[in-house]
Amino acid sequence: MSALAPSEQHFLASKLLSDYVECIDDDRLEEWPDLFVDDCVYQVIARENADRGLPTSAMFCDSRGMLRDRIVALRHANIYAKHYYRHVLSNVNVKGVQDGELLVQSNYVVFQTLVEGDTQIFNAGKYIDRMVATPDGLRLKSKRVVFDTYRIPNLLVTPL
């Protein structure tokens, strides 16, 4: 990763993040785990807990298999109001390379639209990502979603 020019690192990181939110926003959730390596970590945590070093998370998965299970549960077991997400990403910042991993931080806002047509800001915060090169391209080794509010207003069923 360090052999790539900073502009190329930024382009590849931005592309992976765009693919990530597009899978969620377009309800192609079965493709979402493919953006991670097998031994990945996905964590959604309140900023208050993250700042205090507390481990309690709204969502935690420590493998791509767990991510797939999450989607199967969402599609076949969970009961929730039909909704759509729309992500807005900003300030994609490649922080550096460590142990062959690209360290990336970005900001996000997620708008949620219910089938009744009401749209609201559902969640906002930052992504803290570790990305690695694979034969299939850049993939997520870890994704830490740190949301700014202490609570999520509705049940969190769809990944952020």
Image (cartoon, rainbow, N blue to C red):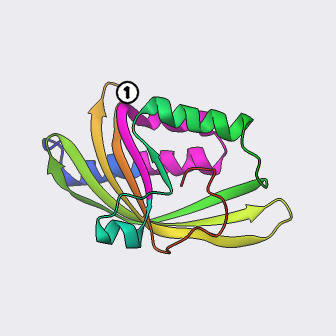
Region of the chain picked out in magenta, as a range: 16-44
- Of 32 and 157, the residue lying toward us: 157
Q: Position of residue 12 (x, y in %)?
A: 33, 46
Q: Height in image: 56 above or below 137?
A: below
Q: Position of residue 34 (x, y in %)?
A: 47, 32
User: Which residue is at a point 74% across and 63% down the rendered structure image?
Assistant: 113
Q: Height in image: 160 above or below 146?
A: above
Q: Is residue 128 left or right of residue 29?
A: left
Q: Is residue 129 left or right of residue 151?
A: left
Q: Is residue 12 left or right of residue 56?
A: left
Q: Residue furthest right?
A: 116
Residue type indicated by callout 1: Asp
- Of 125 and 80, the residue lying toward us: 80
Is 39 colored magenta in this rendering? yes
What SS does tag 1 mark?
loop
Q: Height in image: 92 above or below 6?
A: below
Q: Is residue 42 left or right of residue 154?
A: left
User: Which residue is at a point 86% across and 64% down the rendered structure image?
Assistant: 116
User: Which residue is at a point 65% across and 37% down the rendered structure image?
Assistant: 73
Q: Residue furthest top?
A: 135
Q: Position of residue 1 (x, y in %)?
A: 18, 41
Q: How many marks?
A: 1
- Of 68 and 137, the residue lying toward us: 68
Is 7 colored magenta in this rendering? no
Q: Height in image: 26 above or below 47?
A: above
Q: Position of residue 74 (x, y in %)?
A: 67, 41
**Quadrant of the rendered image containing residue 112:** bottom right
Q: Residues within 10 Å of mark 1 (few under 14, many from 20)?
A: few
**Residue that carries the numbered disc 1 in the rendered image:** 136
